[in-house]
Each structure stands twice: as C-alpha cells, then as structure tokens.
Image (spheres, helix red, strand yellow):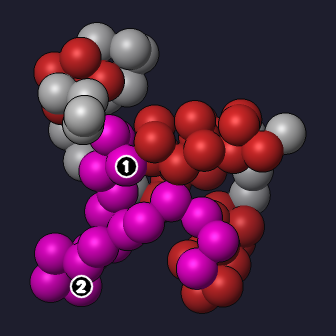
Amino acid sequence: MATPATTALRAGLPDRYLTPEDVAALFSVPLETVYAWRKKRTGPPGFRIGKHLRYDPVAVHAWTAELATHA
C-alpha cells in the first residue's frame, strides 16, 4: 500500500517539490553528483517542468528508504 503524501511530508520533507540544489543539500553532496545520478538513472526520480528539474519529496523519501534496505 502506498504511503499517503501528507504522511511522508510530515516525516521531515518540505511541503513543495525539491530543486536539484535542495536534493544536494539534503544529502550533503555536490550538485554535480545529483546531476550525475540523474544521467545514470541511479538517483531519485526527477521530472521537468519546462526547463526546470524538480523532485517529488515522496519519491526522494522512497528512494532513500530503498537505499537503506540494501545497505
């Protein structure tokens, strides 16, 4: 069963779509790493709104949880 978005957002994630800079700050990695993850399709799924790249906080949370299960 999918986690409701409001529950995931209350888990400490912002109440808006994240920018690549937000993701880099969240994981304390360089911005170039976030772009490399996207290019290699190994990071959280992002999407474009026009020319702007954004990340759904729920998807970022799910990606993080998936990494934690493989660690």
Residue 25 visible here: no
- Magenta region: 41-59
The answer to whether residue 68 is left or right of residue 15 is right
> Could you say whether the residue bearing mark 2 is in a helix, strand or loop?
loop
Foreground of the two, 56 or 18? 56
Q: Which of marks 2 and 1 precedes in the sequence?
A: 2
Count numbered badges in the picture.
Answer: 2
User: Residue most toward the front?
Assistant: 1
Relative image position of residue 44 (x, y in whole percent): 50, 59
**Location of residue 41 with respect to 44 vertically, above or below:** below
Mark pair 1, 2: CA separation: 20 Å
State the residue position of label 2: 51
Q: Which mark is residue 46?
A: none
- Disc 1 marks which amino acid? Ala
Foreground of the two, 49 or 43? 43
- Disc 2 marks which amino acid? Lys
The quarter of the displayed image where residue 12 is located: top left
Q: Magenta segment: does it hold 54?
A: yes
Which quarter of the image is occupied by the N terminus?
top left
The answer to whether residue 71 is left or right of residue 23 is right
What residue lies at 72% left-to-right and 67% top-to-bottom?
33
Relative image position of residue 42 (x, y in whole percent): 64, 71
What residue lies at 84% left-to-right and 39% top-to-bottom?
71
State the residue position of label 1: 59
Q: Tell me the crowding category of disc 1: few under 14, some 14 to 19, or many 20 or more residues within 10 angstroms, Cα based.
A: some
Residue 26 visible here: yes
The answer to whether residue 49 is left or right of residue 66 is left
> Could you say whether the residue bearing mark 1 is in a helix, strand or loop?
helix
What residue lies at 66% left-to-right and 85% top-to-bottom?
40
